[in-house]
Image (cartoon, rainbow, N blue to C red):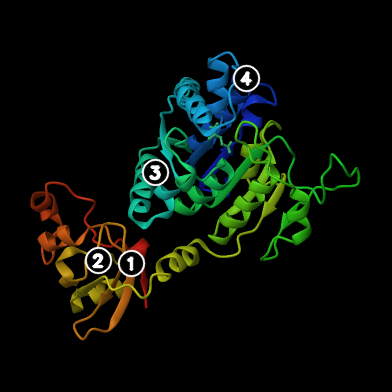
């Protein structure tokens, strides 16, 4: 019934406020009811929600503030828990638990924190809890900030291998030119070509920056990014009846961007971009056979370690004759591997006092060379 099984749904401030200054509980109620329907039908849904600053402004009765970063960070810090309180209450009607995950760019793009962010979100989904993600505005400085939730939603889609990114906004989709200026502008139904046509970038215009929303250009950037890592993207209107359900059922709504690569290719490229790494794990023949059969690398198959690395780093796996076998993201650092190499996975907990799972490299994070 639903084509897509793992969805990232991006709710922008303009959708949540319906263009007013207030978060609309009616709109959120409708969105939550649709999302709940998907969850109860075995879809996994991650929400990327804006609205923290809008909520903060509302809490302070719309003060006149400087347009600087500390003022915005303050508004987010005030608004974020209020926003979460609304979501928690709305979803509680359906006995649906939600959770808050606040991210910065480095949590998603830096290899060391990437695995942690991914594993946390996947653990929540496994528990049938909805992760509600926003940028960690209160601590994000210029260097570590994604800056807009459109691009954040694309990074999240990539992080968890989502099959659909649904960006809900106040427009029906992407137009051939700005419909406010050109009455002949038409809605673009689908983009299949590998590169988004230049004229569409032109017509998307410049980013707007009022309550942190980025306009059509950041939606296009997000679509471009997500489809390259294997995610289908739809930009559609948030408050059109049943648009979430309709998108999940593969009905034609808004503008659809076909993925240009498979999620697997996207992941492989990410891992292979570190091909020259000097961080090396030597493994035995039993482990090599297991990897070739599609299994993960367990500590028992490790012979030795070269170089120094942290959890999340890309490491190269070599055989006893130093031939390259695979590349992968390690769940354990050198310090940890020195304690668990050659040992059984069941002993990891007692040897380290904690564990990140039984695999040193999970099969999903491994590329054979
Ligand atoms: N993180 C901001 C907020 O919650 C919104 C950023 C955006 O909408 O792009 O208010």
Secondary structure type for disc 3: helix
Are the residues tagged 2 and 3 within 8 Å (C-beta)?
no
At a point 45% along the width and 63% down the height, the residue shown is 267
Specify whether 169 is left or right of 145: right
Which of discs 4 and 1 lies nearer the camera? The answer is: 4
Which of discs 4 and 2 lies nearer the camera? The answer is: 4
Give the percent coordinates (x, y) of residue 352: 12, 51
Q: How many marks?
A: 4
341 over 155 or under it: above or below: below
Callout 1 crowding tier (Cα within 10 Å): few <14, some 14–19, many ≥20: many
Q: Earlier in the sequence, mark 2 or mark 1?
A: 2
Q: CA distance from mark 3 to mark 1?
A: 20 Å
At a point 23% along the width and 52% down the height, the residue shown is 357
Q: Which residue is mark 3?
A: 121
Dividing the picture into quadrants, the one containing residue 335 is: bottom left
Q: Which residue is mark 2?
A: 297
Are the residues tagged 3 and 4 within 8 Å (C-beta)?
no
Q: Which residue is mark 4?
A: 22
Q: Is mark 1 within 8 Å of ligand 1?
A: no
Callout 2 crowding tier (Cα within 10 Å): few <14, some 14–19, many ≥20: many
Specify whether 251 is left or right of 85: right
Q: Earlier in the sequence, mark 4 or mark 2?
A: 4
Give the percent coordinates (x, y) of residue 43: 49, 42
């Amino acid at each position: 019934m639903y084509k897509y099984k793992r969805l990232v749904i991006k709710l922008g401030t303009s959708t949540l406020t319906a263009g007013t200054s207030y978060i609309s509980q009616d709109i959120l109620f409708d969105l939550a009811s649709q999302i709940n329907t998907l969850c109860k039908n075995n879809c996994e849904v991650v929400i990327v929600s804006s609205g923290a600053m809008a909520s903060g402004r509302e809490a302070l009765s719309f003060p006149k503030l400087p347009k600087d970063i500390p003022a915005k960070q303050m508004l987010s810090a005030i608004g974020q828990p209020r926003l979460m309180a609304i979501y928690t209450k709305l979803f509680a009607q359906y006995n649906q638990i939600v959770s808050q995950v606040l991210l910065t760019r480095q949590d998603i793009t830096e290899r060391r924190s990437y695995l942690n962010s991914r594993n946390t979100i996947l653990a929540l989904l496994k528990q049938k809890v909805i992760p509600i993600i926003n940028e960690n505005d209160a601590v994000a400085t210029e260097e570590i900030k994604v800056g807009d939730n459109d691009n954040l939603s694309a990074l999240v889609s990539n992080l968890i291998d989502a099959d659909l990114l649904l960006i809900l906004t106040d427009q029906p989709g992407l137009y051939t030119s700005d419909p406010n200026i050109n009455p002949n502008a038409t809605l673009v139904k689908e983009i299949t070509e590998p590169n988004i046509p230049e004229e569409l970038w032109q017509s998307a215009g410049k980013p707007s920056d009022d309550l942190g929303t980025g306009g059509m250009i950041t939606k296009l950037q997000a679509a471009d990014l997500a489809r390259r890592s294997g995610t289908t993207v739809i930009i559609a209107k948030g408050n059109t009846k049943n648009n979430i359900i309709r998108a999940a059922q593969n009905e034609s709504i808004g503008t659809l961007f076909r993925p240009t690569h498979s999620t697997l290719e996207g992941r492989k490229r990410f891992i292979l971009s570190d091909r020259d790494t000097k961080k090396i794990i030597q493994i035995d023949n039993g482990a090599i056979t297991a990897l070739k059969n599609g299994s993960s690398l367990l500590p028992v198959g490790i012979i030795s370690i070269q170089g120094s690395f942290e959890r999340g780093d890309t490491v190269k796996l070599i055989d006893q004759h130093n031939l390259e076998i695979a590349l992968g993201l390690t769940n354990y650092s050198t310090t940890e591997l020195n304690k668990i190499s050659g040992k059984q996975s069941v002993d990891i907990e007692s040897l380290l006092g904690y564990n990140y799972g039984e695999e040193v490299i999970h099969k999903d994070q491994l590329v054979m060379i």
